[in-house]
Image: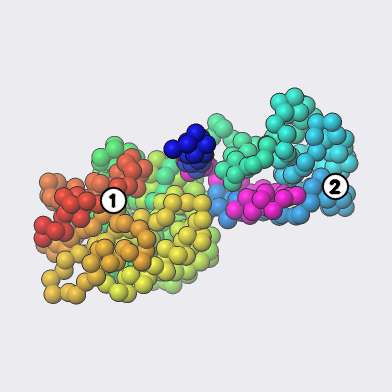
Amino acid sequence: MSTVEYEIKNTTELRNAEDAIRMAELENMRPLPRISVHAFCESEELQRVVERCSHDRRMSKVGLRITSGGIAAAANMFATAPTPNLIILETKAGAANLLSELAPLAAVCDPSTKVIIVGYYNDIALYRELVRNGISEYMVQPVAMPDIMAAMATIFVDPDAEPLGRSIAFIGAKGGVGSSTIAHNCAFGISNLFSTETILADLDLPYGTANIDFDQDPTQGIAEAVYAPDRLDEVFLDRLLTKCSEHLSLLAAPSLLDRAYDFEGQAFQPVLDVLQRNAPVTVLDVPHAWSEWTRSVLASVDEVVICASPDLANLRNTKNMMDALRKMRPNDKMPHLILNQVGMPKRPEISPSDFCEPLETDPIAIIPFDANLFGNAANSGRMISEMDAKSPTAETFSQISHVVTGRIAIKKARKGGLLGLLKRK
């Protein structure tokens, strides 16, 4: 390998490592508050970066506009219009004349408006002069999407705010694939394995089974929360939660058909906000449905887990869901996939490798069909690890709990691992 090739290889690896670090930091970033942002972009590169920001789930409350042009275009526009909470300006002006070019904009800018400048000169003296004159941040091209979002978070997110808990949504590719059972066992596993306060929220209001699976009969639950968002705070939430174990609480579904459960797109967002502020981990049992509110929930959580059985309808639905979620969550990791009920007697199946090939992903777990184990657990109101802690299935749920909470990296299943469980059947 020549010296030039070696340097290019090292530079590429360094950039990839830096990008990975920035994306990891982005995963832990709190959502931005409800603010207005107007970006003025002189280059197509920055315009693409800002457009990518606009599709990020952490920007769901942000009103963002993008205009071609620089400082002069901003000054002209805001001479007759109120300024937003934040202006992002791209400019090629240097230290000698940048402040003078900013003067017309400063004359029409509201004092509370923050300004981020994206320039082309790596000049510490210029940076200090801009900060002294009220500019919130000066960034040097090339900038990436995590850089822009981190700059906005620095300005508008309280650094002393309590960290938000991790939210994990489980949804089935088809009804009856065991998504709820997997969600409940994983919530129980997370709370026990890591001694972490965990809330399981059953979002299937008419048919939810979390109360049955944990042998509970609460009089209140998620219905009271979603129908009274104005009352929802930490005290009210505590009244609605049911204790299932030392570290696991349940926000149960009413499981009644006394009303139609029709919700607007953002109906569950106040509930999710309160849950994330009050527990390190929230597990959401999302019903198999595709509506505005389920899309909103899936778009806003930290992790999505799709549960499927190995047949053609599940494959089609999983592919459609993954494609839709990639568009809804372009800056997030792909949804996790769990294959469940594998090896059911007398049922024709698609092999795991053939199932996963068109999806371009590997499952984080393959759970064999075991009618006795799961049936007895369900009828007893107990979890799999309570029924048989040493069973391969209990170990599988332990591994899933590690993966979805980010405690271990996802590894391709190998012989003797999760795939090995199936081969021993």
Region rendered in magenta: 24-52
Above or below residue 352? Residue 129 is above
Residue 13: horizontal and vertical position, in percent? 47, 39
Residue 105: horizontal and vertical position, in percent? 85, 42
Query: Does residue 76 appear anywhere in the picture?
Result: yes
Furthest-front residue in this view: 2
Residue at the (82%, 35%) spot, across then down: 98
Lateral position of residue 169 relative to residue 347, left or right: right
Residue ID for mark 2 = 72
- The quarter of the picture where the N terminus appears is top left
The colour style of the image is rainbow
Residue ID for mark 1 = 412
Callout 1 crowding tier (Cα within 10 Å): few <14, some 14–19, many ≥20:
few
Residue at the (16%, 54%) spot, across then down: 420
Residue 206 figure quarter:
bottom left
Who is closer to the viewer here, 374 or 379? 374
Single out the mark in the foreground, 1 or 2: 1
